[in-house]
Each structure stands twice: as C-alpha cells, then as structure tokens.
Amino acid sequence: MSSRTGELSPQLHAYLLAHSAPADPVLRELADETARRFPSAAVMQIGAEQGTFMTLLTRIAGVTDAVEVGTFTGYSSICLARGLADGGRLLCCDVSEEWTSIARQYWQRAGVADRIELRIGPALDTLRALPAGPSLDLAFIDADKPGYIGYWDEIVPRIRPGGIILVDNTLYGGQVIDMADQDASVQGIRDFNDHAAADDRVELVLLPVGDGLTLARKSSASRG
Ligand SMILES: C[S@@+](CC[C@H](N)C(=O)[O-])C[C@H]1O[C@@H](n2cnc3c(N)ncnc32)[C@H](O)[C@@H]1O
C-alpha cells in the first residue's frame, strides 16, 4: 500500500470504471464515432472517468454559468452540461466547424443542446468579448497548449470568488519533466503550470486524473 498515486494497470482502470457511474450509450457512441472518423485526433477527447468527475463536480458546485475552451467533438461539453443547475448555460469555444458539427449532433442526442452556445473563432477573442466582471462559476481549459496562459489570464478575473477552473493535460504524458523535450505544446504546459502555481488569486491542485487535471478554486478574498 502507498499514499502516493500509483500508475493504473489496464485491469485496475477497468475496475475503476466498473465502480463509477457508467458512461451512458450517447457518450460511448460519441467516443466510438470520434475514434472511427478522426483516428489520429481522438486521443484529444477526455476519458470516461474524467467526464464523470467533471459532471459530478459541476453538479456539486451548483454551476449555472460555465465556459469551455476547446470542444472538439463534444465529449467534455456534454459532461459539463449534464452537471449544470436548472437554467444553467455552457459557452463552448472552438475554431473547428468540422469537429464541432459532431458535437452539435451529440448535444441534441444527449438532450443538452438548449443549454449550450457554441462560438467558432479563436477562444482568446471569444473570452475577451465576455463581460469583464466575475460572472462565471466554472471554466474548463482544453485547447491549444501554448494558449493556456492567455486563456487563464482572461478567465480568472471572470470567475466569481469560490468558482472553479479545470485545466486539462497538465502532465502531458509525463513530458513536462523531460526538459530535453522542447515541443511547443509541452513547453506551453510547463509555462502554464508555473504561472498558475504562482497565482495567489487561486488555490489549486494538479490531479493525476487522465493526462493531468488541474483543479483551481478562486479565493473568496480575491478581487482580480
Ligand atoms: C484537446 S481538443 C478538446 C477536447 C474536448 N475538450 C473533449 O474532451 O472532447 C482541443 C480543441 O481545441 C480547439 N482549438 C485549438 N486552438 C484553438 C483556439 N485558438 N481557439 C479555440 N479553440 C481552439 C481545437 O479545434 C480542438 O477541438
């Protein structure tokens, strides 16, 4: 036994999934269709346990206003939208009409289309066009990695005190600690992790969920 998070064997991962709320048929079909149509890009989709965690977290926090940066074919957006409080809204940001056309179909099938608004265009522009004040309860960042600091800096002031920011891929397959790896996405994640860890407007933890999931809470005292 160890108090440190260990690596999950495929068998232990299967056990973990079998003892969590199951991904429903719509999410399973979305994962299958994404893998069939976009085999090389499908790895971008969050995993089932992360999706279930995000639904529960959204529900526990009573989220009404949420934003997602990086929607792809819609898996994470469905998980977030399902956790919203009654009357809640999710704004999705992406640059791809092709990938998000799949998301639109599955939003209908999942019964969440009426809670989601999609804005196509660079997410930084979409975020900057939002009201400057703290009106968001939750944000999920999962787009281009070199853009993460920019998204964070637009989002933090717009999150209400006590609100939540989730950031995906913050371990980046373990490449974050291989300093010989100078890939722009890896360096973007390293720079972001340093930036967020030094931000005194939030308290945060980098969780070994999926490819690394940073969970931040905006401090109640923060004005920024
Ligand atoms: C990792 S995928 C998102 C996966 C999604 N969250 C899921 O779980 O299925 C990243 C997405 O970010 C989008 N993206 C990349 N650069 C972007 C930008 N500058 N603005 C908005 N979206 C961008 C891509 O089109 C892609 O759909």
Image (cartoon, rainbow, N blue to C red):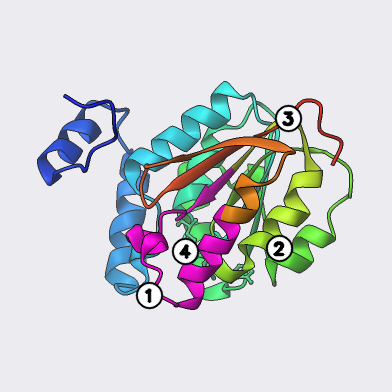
Outermost residue, left direction? Answer: 11
Q: What residue do we see at 44% from left, 51% from top?
A: 75
Q: What residue do we see at 52% from left, 62% from top?
A: 189
Local secondary structure at mark 2? helix
Magenta residues span: 166-193
- C-alpha distance separating marks 4 and 2: 27 Å
* Residue 106 showing in the rendered view: yes
The residue to which callout 1 is attached is 180
The residue to which callout 3 is attached is 219
Task: Please tell me which residue lies in front, 99 or 40.
Answer: 40
- Mark 1 or 3: the one toward you: 1
Mark 4 or mark 2: name the one nearer the start of the chain.
4
- Horizontal arrangement in the rendering, residue 45 relative to residue 157 (left or right): left
- Mark 4 or 1: the one toward you: 1
Query: What amino acid does circle 1 point to?
Result: Ala
- C-alpha distance separating marks 4 and 1: 37 Å
The residue to which callout 2 is attached is 150
The residue to which callout 4 is attached is 102
- Mark 2 or 1: the one toward you: 1
